[in-house]
DNA sequence: TCACTGTGAGACAGATTGACTCACAAATCA
DNA sequence: TGATTTGTGAGTCAATCTGTCTCACAGTGA
């Protein structure tokens, strides 16, 4: 990767614009993110926003990406204990995901992706990235659970994600409920029963 | 309900507008549904669209509602056999729901609801309607399955919907996969295992 | 036949969009 | 330090979209 020297002014205004864009996204959904609104909110000239993101989609994708940082890995002790108790690591990731879905900003991102990813190429890519992120977070724990005999040995991380993340998304975006730890734990246990050897 | 006499001209243009609106929704998502676009597509004056739906939300809700008719009940023989084999009725409804989600028009409706139901009151209501529709379709079959001893007796239609509809929505809108009968059947079986007595 | 009413076409102001200038100040480099 | 480069903010402009209004007309029901 070639060393890109960035003008501090560029960096400064870009950061202000991205922050403004994610705020707008959280407050009013994807439609609220426009060059004009971002410029006003970031205290920046309208032309500057156009200079950084000539097309609206790019601007919105920047807001979406900034609003959904990757999940953090489980703490060392949980991962270490994973051989003895694979459930704990699964619960860790899915509770974290649950909190994310409950969070207004990340919730708005996922809602936008769910709603808009069929027609748009950039959105498609973001959807794929998000999905990979989630499934890969779960993969080690699923593998450990299979090795430990808690899950059937033909269970993939993809299948397990479907039976856990699916219900969480349903509960959050269709039922409109908040995702407490009890809900998440129940979903994990239900999935463990469904895929028990 | 008082007998409303409707001017045939009203009925005609209303039908044309609703049809145009759902087409636009399918083709370009909720954002593509505007008074102007509907007027042009329906071959109708712009003022006419405003006359029927003074605000944009109402117009879009009309498009959404028209694009998502209720699920049809299981055929008589499936329902009759439900005592002996509750799984068949569950499969019937969820296959139907799967086909709906695969369908571009209904898929666009659900995607819009998933993506936009947090901020908007009208959307909230539509989301609730949709949810009730889905859960109530499943309820008799779930009750039958509980009675027949195929499901734990504390399983509600709501909980069962979460573990079946959730994965289908996930598979369709996050993974981006089409929902074949095999996928749906696998989801049903997985849910039956998860909630087995 | 005749009054009524929903309609299509168009005019209109206001807002938004995207492209374009231009002076200025911050950043870079000698 | 001082000269030059370059990103920026403010503004202009045409094109488009939105929401409201008027008006002639034709389909409707009596």
Image: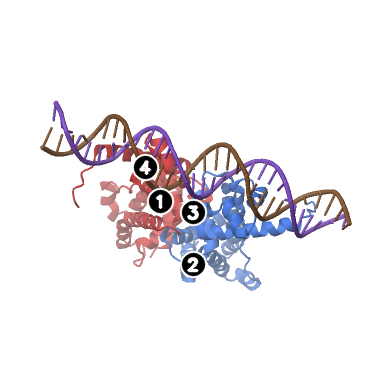
Chain colours: A red, B blue, C brown, D purple
Q: CA distance from mark 4 to mark 1?
A: 13 Å
Circle on res. A57: 1
- The kind of secondary structure element at disc 3 is helix
**Badge 4 element:** helix
In primary-sequence order, the first of circles 4 and 3 is 4
Residue at position x 62%, y 53% from top?
B62
Q: For the residue carrying disc 4, how many other residues have a C-alpha within 10 Å: few (<14), some (14-19), or many (20+)?
A: many
* SS category of the residue bearing label 2: helix
Q: Earlier in the sequence, mark 1 or mark 3?
A: 1
Residue carrying label 2 = B184
* Viewer-nearest of discs 4 and 3: 4
In the image: residue A152, left or right of residue B129: left
| Vertical relation: B132 (above or below) B179 | above
Q: Chain of mark 1?
A: A
Q: Nearer the viewer, residue A191 or B25?
A: B25
Query: In this rendering, would B145 be left or right of B7?
Result: left
Locate residue A16, reporting x and y percent. Answer: 34, 37
C-alpha gap between disc 2 and disc 4: 45 Å
Q: Is residue A98 visible?
A: no
The residue that mark 4 highlights is A49
The residue mark sitting in front, 4 or 1, is 4
Question: Same chain for the residues at labels 2 and 4, yes or no?
Answer: no
Residue B141 point in image, percent of width and height: 59, 63
Between the C-alphas of marks 3 and 2, the distance is 16 Å
In the figure, A24 relative to A158: above or below? above
Tell me whether circle 4 and circle 1 mark residues in contact (CB < 8 Å). no
Mark 1 vs mark 2, foreground winner is 1
- The location of residue B45, given as percent across then percent down, is 65, 53
Residues at marks 1 and 2 on the same chain: no
Quadrant of image for the C terminus of chain A: bottom left
Q: Which residue is mark 3?
A: A170
């Amino acid at each position: 990767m070639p060393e890109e020297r960035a003008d501090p002014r560029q960096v400064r205004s870009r950061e202000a614009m991205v922050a403004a864009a994610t705020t707008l996204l959280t407050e009013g959904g994807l439609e609220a993110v426009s060059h004009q609104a971002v410029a006003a909110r970031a205290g920046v000239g309208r032309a500057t926003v156009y200079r950084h993101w000539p097309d609206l989609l790019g601007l919105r994708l920047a807001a979406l990406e900034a609003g959904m940082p990757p999940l953090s890995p489980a703490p060392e002790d949980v991962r270490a204990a994973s051989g003895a108790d694979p459930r704990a690591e699964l619960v860790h990731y899915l509770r974290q995901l649950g909190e994310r879905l409950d969070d207004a900003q990340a919730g708005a991102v996922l809602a936008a992706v769910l709603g808009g990813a069929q027609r748009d190429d950039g959105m498609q890519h973001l959807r794929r990235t998000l999905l990979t992120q989630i499934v890969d977070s779960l993969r080690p724990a699923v593998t450990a659970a299979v090795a430990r005999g808690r899950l059937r040995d033909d269970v993939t991380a993809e299948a397990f994600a479907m039976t856990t993340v699916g219900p969480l998304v349903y509960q959050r975006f269709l039922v409109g409920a908040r995702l407490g730890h009890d809900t998440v734990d129940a979903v994990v246990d239900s999935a463990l029963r469904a895929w028990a050897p």
